[in-house]
Amino acid sequence: MIRVVTLDPFDDKQLAKFNRTLYTAFGVGSEHSGSAEVPAGMSEPLDAEKLIDEVKGIRSYKDDKVLILTTRKLKDRELPSGVAPTAGFARQGKDRAILTIAPHKDLESAFKAVSRHALHQLGHLWELHHCLDPRCSMYPPWTPSFVQGEAIFCTFCREKSEQKIRLAKS
Amino acid sequence: MPEGSASLQLAVGDRVVYPNQGVCRVSAIDVKEVAGQKLTFVTMRREEDGAVVMVPEGKVLAIGVRKVASAEDVEAIFAFLRSDSDKADLDWKQRARTNLDRMTQGGIMGLAEVVKGLQVLSELRPLPTKERELYDNARHLLVTEVAAALSTAEVNAEDAIDIVLFPPGRERPKRTAAEFQREDGDLDLDSDLLGLDSDLDLPSDEEPAEEEPSEESESQEEEESSEESAPKKRGRPPKAKAEGAEGAEPAAPKKRGRPPKPKPEASAEGAEPAAPKKRGRPPKPKPPEVEGAPPAAPKKRGRPPKVKPPEGES
């Protein structure tokens, strides 16, 4: 089950549409599971790694994947090879991911790009790596063509995610 | 011999890399008796999923187990990935063999070479399924080792690698086969790139045999005249022609398929052409007719009538 938790107010209809997109992509139920508070002392831009660990008030089962959705900016990560633009973050194979819709104000104005980003982060939760196919949602998200693509997976990534989901169910 | 394994002294708690399996932690080194022999076994637990493997101490080096790469090695990896030095081998057999060696014995640099090579190749054309799987495996092993070496999350390690491979704000370049051309000029292209199917000039059954040499000689002349202006065709180069005496007629090109049957030569000029041979069963020879004899009654079909017994015998 995919549980979408919001840190800021979102339109319910847009959230329902967003959940339908996730359900279509993964074949797993997706729902809005309420909202949570940003931990005290954290300011914008938010540190994604820290926020994932510290955000409270999320109820989920062991096999659930939680996607935290926010309108606030996330801080770019300093990595040994350079700075990684960060619109989302997910720990490989774990259960929590975070995604921002910034610089857009609402889901409606950037629905396609946000959906594609969501698939990307949830894909990391199901142990998918970055893909070589520019049409796939697992393509590196900082490339210029990423936001123009559809919220879909390539054949390889789709099959791999389905396999992981089947294994998780059994 | 993989790098870093020349002098491998293992202790419990060490992090090692098992080729093709990933980062493991040495959980025990103990002596066990197997078939009457006392052997020292190194027990390793894979960090990813906790799978356990026991290896005799003497086999550890031969298998290719090595220590986790250092931060300096990772820097070298980034420098290699950033460089534009690696061109993929277009010969799939050679590529498969090289990649297999790199995966098992190449160390972390071998993994980076596989990832870089297949990534460059994917800029020319989509990878086939097996190589896509190989790419994913190599990437997974590279990411886990870089994460272990830098003590960071796997996602950060993967992003650090991909920032180099896919620089932000830039699209991947489209490669052409000419970029992969080696110094000897051989492209080593696979048959799908060569388009060999279109080069097969199978003889058609409908064309008359006599017209072919003239057509081909015309086409040869055309080819010779257009050789200088037309761009060089892709594909298999034509076979070298046998050198004959000057002025002699060029030998007809060897045709593919079954050779035509030799035609029967006419015995004399003006003789009637032989009637075309009919297909099917030959007609039965007619019995010689006797003059004055009545014509034979047509043969009745069906069962012959029973012979009546002669009357008055009983």
Image: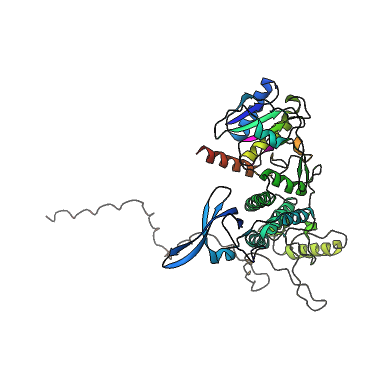
* Principal secondary structure, stretch drawn in magenta: loop
Total numbered circles: 0
Magenta highlight on residue B312: no
Q: Position of residue B171 (x, y in %)?
A: 79, 44
Q: Residue at x 79, y 65 (%)?
A: B217
Q: Does residue B192 appear anywhere in the picture?
A: no
Give the residue furthest to the left. Answer: B314
Q: Position of residue A124 (x, y in %)?
A: 65, 40
Q: Is residue A90 above or below residue B281?
A: above
Please state if A104 lies on the left or on the right of A138 as rendered.
Answer: right
Q: Position of residue B220 (x, y in %)?
A: 80, 64
Instruction: Specify start and end residues of the magenta stretch as a single range.
Output: A89-96
Q: Does residue B72 appear anywhere in the picture?
A: yes
Q: Position of residue A90 (x, y in %)?
A: 67, 38
Please state if B223 lies on the left or on the right of B256 as rendered.
Answer: right
Q: Is residue B160 above or below residue B240?
A: above
Q: Residue at x 69, y 41 (%)?
A: A138
Give the residue furthest to the bottom. Answer: B245
Query: In the picture, residue B245 is in which quadrant?
Result: bottom right
Residue closest to the eye, A62 or A152: A62
Residue closest to the eye, A58 or B111: A58
Q: Residue at x 57, y 31 (%)?
A: A1
